[in-house]
Image (cartoon, rainbow, N blue to C red):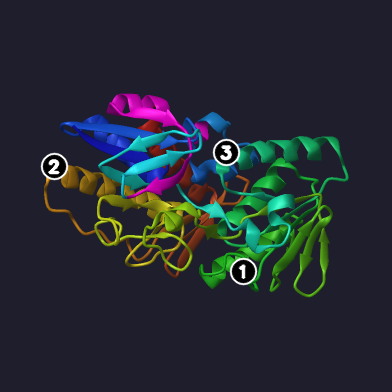
Amino acid sequence: MKRLVLLGGGHAHVYVLDALARARLPDTEVTLISPYPRQIYSGMLPGWIAGHYHIDETAIPLTPLAERAGVRFKQARGIGLDLDARRVRCDDGSEVAFDRLSIDTGPTTASARIAGGTQHGIAVRPIEDFVTRIDALIAAASADPACSAAIIGSGAAGFELALALRARLPKLPLTLIGSTALPLDGLPGRLQRRARRLLDARHIDWVGRHRAQNIDTDGVWLDDGQHVRASHVLQVTGAAAPEWPAQSGLATDAGGFIRVGPTLQSISHPFVFAAGDVAAYADPRPKSGVFAVRAGPPLADNLRRNITGDTLQRWQAQRRALYLISTGDRRALAAWGPLSIEGAWVWRWKDHIDRAFMARFSQRDM
């Protein structure tokens, strides 16, 4: 009996579970290790904050999905690996043995890069903790007119978060801080300019071309000595790798992400696979849920091929990704390469895609 361990309940592993529910692996015991019994879909999180969804609508229940796949679910957090003995170390003190290991734990937020971030900031990851703290922020802002918020990070996630909070809390003093001239850096210039106008229209202060240096109990200190006052500081600053992959001896890139080849196997330990944001692909792509989701089917296929002794298939992520960015008011922006569009129909398109994704894995009607 072979032993396959799926470490983490990320977007790619959700696809693996779905594939196993459709066709189980022969003579193989499969275990899923995840600290949470659900996977919150990050693409719908701004919609929940804005009030468009109930939190349950944004979450894939892992326990029933694992049951349908014939997979044992262990609720724990992986904190290390013994690659010689082929064991996963868990935060409850237990160890789980494996013959093959697949890792899709996701990244952490790079909170420590900003002084005081760990102590005083609200990090977007892990998402379960973020959801709890956003609930607390909404309650505080509803009860205290002196409440205010600043968001560090002006990429798509930070921009969506700012507009979602504005939709939920129309009177909350709100500032978006970014190191670039305009929000949505890297997307078409037309979309960046539109994003800037939307911030003005929603009365969200934009502080561009500045980096956060320190977070304290009163707000954020910037690199020019400016202080942005805020009772709550949210960090949507880039992904950081957990420490344990490198400490365990897996080959990692300079950021600590697990280096994998085109077959999604670790370049140092071929019995280990990795996908999603925790992986450093042979052909690098941005840390994005778009690419994590796309890695799911080839990961499921290659795990099956590896266990059954078939030739593994090479995979390369698409060069371009479709970005659908909600604006908090049941409208959305879209970008595909240099092309961009916006409107209420873009929101309906995004909502349809998101609900279809959730229905597939949650056995819900659209």
Question: Image point 86% across, 39% down: which residue?
Answer: 144
Q: Which amino acid does label 2 sit on?
A: Thr
Secondary element under disc 3, as helix, strand or loop, is helix
Foreground residue among 231 and 348: 231
- The stretch drawn in magenta includes residue 219: no
Question: Image point 80% across, 38% down: which residue?
Answer: 140
- State the residue position of label 3: 128
Q: Residues within 10 Å of mark 1 (few under 14, many from 20)?
A: few
Foreground residue among 45 and 32: 32
* Distance CA(mark 2)–CA(mark 1): 52 Å
- What percent of the width, then of the height, locates residue 317? 32, 60
Q: Which of marks 3 and 1 is nearer the N terminus?
A: 3
Question: Image point 69% across, 74% down: which residue?
Answer: 209
Secondary element under disc 2, as helix, strand or loop, is helix
- What percent of the width, then of the height, locates residue 88? 39, 41
**C-beta proximity under 8 Å, tags 3 and 1:** no
- What percent of the width, then of the height, locates residue 265? 27, 55
- State the residue position of label 1: 193
